[in-house]
Image: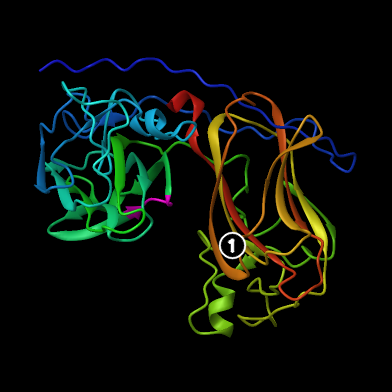
Amino acid sequence: MKKIKCPIVVFFLIVFLYSESYIYSQPSAIPKFSKKAKLLFPNSDFEYGNLYNWRAFGKAFLNQPTLGDNIFARESPKSALPQCSWWVGSYENYQGLPGQNPGDAQKNDAVGELVSRTFMIETPYIGFLISGGSKKTTAIRLIVNGEIVRETTGQNHPLMTREFWDVKEYLNQPAVISIIDKDKGMWGCINADDFRGYSVPDNMLLFPNSDFEMGNLNHWKAQGSAFERQPTLGDNPSVREYGKHSNHQGKYWIGTYELYQGKPGEKPGMVRKDVAFGTLRSEPFKIRGYAIRFLLGGGKGSGLEVRLYVDGKVVMTAKNAENKEDMKSVIWTVSKYKGKDAEIEIIDDSMDAWGHINVDDFRYVRLLDDI
């Protein structure tokens, strides 16, 4: 069966702000997207328009794959942004067949599993697109020797994001991909597309240290006292109180209530409380992705927010919706600012109760070359 060629889709993006305190003359270089990734096996991108090399169990994946951006047809401007023509979405029910209409859905009532044929892991990384529910009941799994060795969920958002698994330890071993939907509740769905092997994962950071994993504030400029002892190391809230978590990515994150960096004399769980305020501004960077995702938590009060500047103007803002330490994903669509210089600003201008902000892991969910 012939593979359907992928239509070319072009999007545009930007963001910029000037600050006289910067000494950066040029935005930091970031490696560009490489198109050397290869399919894991024939139809691992669903572009045959059927489930060849996949096996469906239950009802969630019986009417798959889905044709076109069905979410956009139903809920514009929301979008799944599939890689090409076909993708898997357990909420969807449109394959271009007679009697069907773009946007048709079977909703969250059906459950099931979609399992790939066995393939050999030949590259150190596996990349794919995913969106949908954030629970482990809606997930994509890598199974090696009968064991689940990698698992990724969605972010309660329809836009499919590019994720990568480091699988170097499983090179030259047989594996299968399992896509599960075992949830009938809200966001009880999973979307997936374009499984490929990568020699090197795409660099999705906005700029070096946009995820704070350098363990310092390199490529950021702090003003005021709130960010003096940042970033924070580890899940500091869980040390203070059982059941609370930061939900951070990697090792380091920004938490203006926190005072622990793993340095001599410091103890996990140390805090400064809500007595400091200030701003943290990123270096300028060029927008090269379709959308930006980051984690946000802390207080919901005034004076606590994250801003995106373009041409000296605020074009995006985000505030936490509740007083809660654990961070949740925020996604900004920035395609109309393609190629522009941009800056991120994190603001803590509050000394009230819950007058602190938690932030982490600024990265692109899709690169423009990836669309």
Residue 187 at x, y percent in the picture = 36, 53
- For this rendering, which residue is in front, 274 or 68? 68
Tag 1: residue type?
Answer: Tyr
182 sits to left or right of 226: left
- For this rendering, which residue is in front, 97 or 252? 97
Residue 309 at x, y percent in the picture = 74, 37
Above or below, 104 relative to 302 = above
**Label 1: which secondary element:** strand
Q: Which residue is mark 1?
A: 252
82 sits to left or right of 202: left
- For this rendering, which residue is in front, 189 or 261? 189
Q: Is residue 195 visible?
A: no
Q: Residue at x 71, y 55 (%)?
A: 305
Quadrant occupied by the C terminus: top left
Q: Is residue 209 visible?
A: yes
Q: Residue at x 55, y 82 (%)?
A: 239
Q: Which portion, as a residue range, is magenta?
A: 152-156
Residue 125 at x, y percent in the picture = 33, 43
Q: Residue reaching furthest front?
A: 99
The image quadrant of residue 136 is bottom left
Judge the density around disc 1: few (<14), some (14-19), many (≥20) Cα neighbours within 10 Å. many
The image quadrant of residue 134 is bottom left
Q: Is residue 251 magenta?
A: no
Quadrant occupied by the N terminus: top left
Coloration of the structure image: rainbow
The dominant secondary structure in magenta is loop
Residue 247 at x, y percent in the picture = 51, 65
Q: Residue at x 63, y 40 (%)?
A: 207
Q: Residue reaching furthest right?
A: 20
Q: Residue at x 74, y 68 (%)?
A: 229
